[in-house]
Amino acid sequence: MKYTTIPNTTIKVSKICLGTMTFGQQNTETEAHEQLNYAVSQGVNFIDTAEMYPVPGKAETQGKTEQFIGTWLTHQKREDFVIASKITGPNPYFTYLRDNLGFSKSVIHDALEKSLQRLQTDYLDLYQLHWPDRNANYFGQRNFNHDLKEEWEDNILEVVHTLDGLVKAGKIRHYGLSNETSWGVMRHLSESNQHKLTRCKTIQNPYSLLNRTYEINLSEVGLRENVGLLAYSPLAFGVLSGKYLDGKVPENSRLKLFPQYARYSNPQSEFLTKKYYELAQDLNMSLAQLSLAFVNQRPFVTSNIIGATNLNQLKENISSIDFDLSAETLQKIDALHELQPNPAP
């Protein structure tokens, strides 16, 4: 395993982070523990979850992912692991979580306490805002129309104050953002700097061979302001495993079970995925290994969040850390990227 440090902290994390959003939906508690044990045996010490997991979110399963991690964590040395979770932002689909999904002080405190209880721990190493509580293009959609007449009062200073208090109370060590824009990151940093409050250390946004929009401007923010990217969906909802090529939709696959997750299921993505598959074949690598190795090597990536529904997938994904892509290979990837720079709608 390779390791890095969360920016502006002394926390060492594995370059591969174990994503857990399938725990409690596609994976049983026993399977979740098997994945955790295998990942740890390979040197992974970083585990990411969220209060709304598993995905897709629904009232019947909400919180199960944290619960499964919690029952495993009680048999481990807590200080050996870096545990990250997230508070859910406003969304009409998640009103079962609480009456108010905004990031008020009381809501943040309540959500955190419930996550800590499910995880059976006294603190989180990293607490993240799952997406902004303002209207913003936080999932990077094309042709997005900004509604600046929304009913949102600028509360970013209050949010940072609240998180600063939780750091001082020992409930969290650091905080991060997720599905955030450049404007949002800079506003958080500005409030932290101006008022001498705790600073956001990470941003968890999508990044993969099929979605390199992070490079357009957020990468500069991350590099200049020392905010590390925790890359999620590095396999683009599993498309970059190659299992959906030529119209295939395997039984029990994510797209078969949850056809709504079709962001990367379009002709543009199919075209580019085939090109990357051919390159991987030339390099004697699997498409998943090539895709993940690319993310692992990006200079703005602190950790690459991989997920799996079985141990074979997990082994293949973690093995990507053993590959170092040459400058020539990276040039070939960039040339293919130019053929279809932004395939996701």
Image: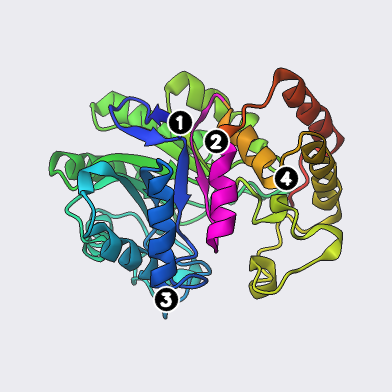
Element marked by disc 4: helix
Upstream in the sequence, badge 1 or badge 3? 1
Q: Earlier in the sequence, mark 1 or mark 2?
A: 1
CA gap, disc 1 to disc 4?
21 Å
C-beta proximity under 8 Å, tags 3 and 2: no
Q: Are marks 2 and 4 in contact (CB under 8 Å)?
A: no
Up-down relation of residue 94 to residue 280 (above or below): below
Question: Residue at 35% across / 52% down in the picture?
Answer: 85
Residues marked 1 and 4 touching at CB (< 8 Å):
no
Give amino acid for label 3: Thr
SS for dot 2: helix
Query: How far apart are the alpha carbons under marks 1 and 3?
Result: 34 Å
Mark 1: secondary structure:
loop
**N-terminal of the two: label 1 or label 4?**
1
Magenta residues span 299-321
Read off the residue under disc 2: 321
Residue 245 appearing in the image: yes
Q: CA separation, marks 2 and 4?
A: 14 Å
Q: Residue 152: x, y in percent?
A: 43, 53
Task: Give the image quarter of residue 162.
Answer: top left
Judging by the rendered image, the residue that carries numbered circle 3 is 61
Tag in front: 4 or 3: 4
Residue at numbered disc 1: 2
Q: Do the CB atoms of the residues marked 1 and 2 lie less than 8 Å apart? A: yes
Query: Pointers 4 and 3 in contact (CB under 8 A)?
Result: no
The residue singled out by tag 4 in the image is 287
Q: Earlier in the sequence, mark 2 or mark 4?
A: 4
- Is 177 placed left or right of 215 in the picture? left
Residue at 64% across / 33% down in the picture?
A: 294
Which one is in front, 290 or 125?
Answer: 290
Estimate the spatial distance between the alpha carbons at disc 1 and disc 2, rounded to whole Å. Answer: 7 Å
